[in-house]
Image: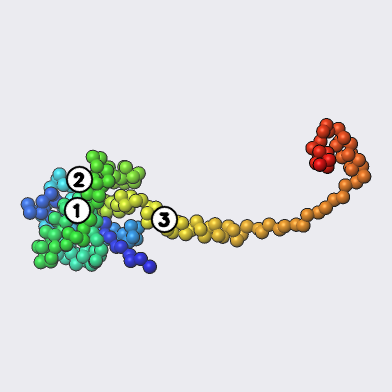
Amino acid sequence: MSEQVREIVFDTETTGMDPFEGDRIIEIGCVEVINQVPTGRTYHQYINPEREIPADATAVHGITDEMVKDKPVFAEIFTEFLEFVGQGTLVAHNASFDMKFINYELKTVGHPSVDKRQVIDSLAIARKKFPGSPASLDALCRRFGIDLSGREFHGALLDAQLLAEVYLELNGGRQHGLSLKEDEDKKNEASNSALLRPKKTTREPRHFKPSEEELAAHAELLEQITDPLWKDIKAS
């Protein structure tokens, strides 16, 4: 049995663009994917950034100071976040942005940074696969026909769920993860159909002797044929 590949597709929402300028994480959303199929396990957490959220940031993700004022700070949740990630590979869209914040926050609590070899950037994959085309999460969702109707604001968990679908498509689509099972199902269906199909019975041929009237009619018909081939055969 092949080894399972566990990946954690995730996204963050922040107060701004740069943790070194005082910006902080205010939301983390994660989706567990095994062998490129979402398992249904997720991790989601709002975080108190211990600072005000600028209005322009709220306009993007819809998160207000009121929503996070009673939420835990990063130091209180980072262990459960890391436990959910475990040994899995982190997948993010424009991963350098998210990892810059994650590693900054980890440093503030005295924890080592995440090894960059444990991170995959789906944006880099998209740009390589579709050079010159828009590669934002929204653009990729539209390209792959993924429903965006419920996405009024950017949200970490919702974006992680959308990214999990996009990431699957970037790696070959749903058939890539399910083709073996589908092939097996088709074989089983064909086998079951063959078993349920009634067997054909072969009957012995029945011989009918022609009547005297039929023989006479046949002889009369043969006499009407000019130069029949079988007369030449008999003559030879």
What is the spatial separation of the Cα atoms under label 1 and label 2, in whole angstroms?
18 Å
Mark 1 or mark 2, earlier in chain: 2
Three-letter amino acid code at disc 2? Val
On the image, the x and y values in percent for residue 13 come to: 19, 52
Q: Specify the quadrant of the image occupied by residue 78.
A: bottom left
Three-letter amino acid code at disc 3? Ser
Labels 1 and 2 touching (C-beta < 8 A): no
Q: Residue furthest left?
A: 21
| Residue on which disc 2 sits | 60
Tell me if residue 66 can be seen: no
Q: Quadrant of the N terminus?
A: bottom left
Three-letter amino acid code at disc 1? Ala
- Judging from the image, what secondary structure is the residue with disc 3 in? helix
- Camera-side residue of 112 and 194: 194
Left or right of 195, for residue 130: left
- Camera-side residue of 232 and 80: 232
| Residue on which disc 1 sits | 95
Looking at the rendered image, the disc whose residue lies closer to the viewer, 1 or 2, is 1
What is the spatial separation of the Cα atoms under label 3 and label 1, in whole angstroms?
29 Å
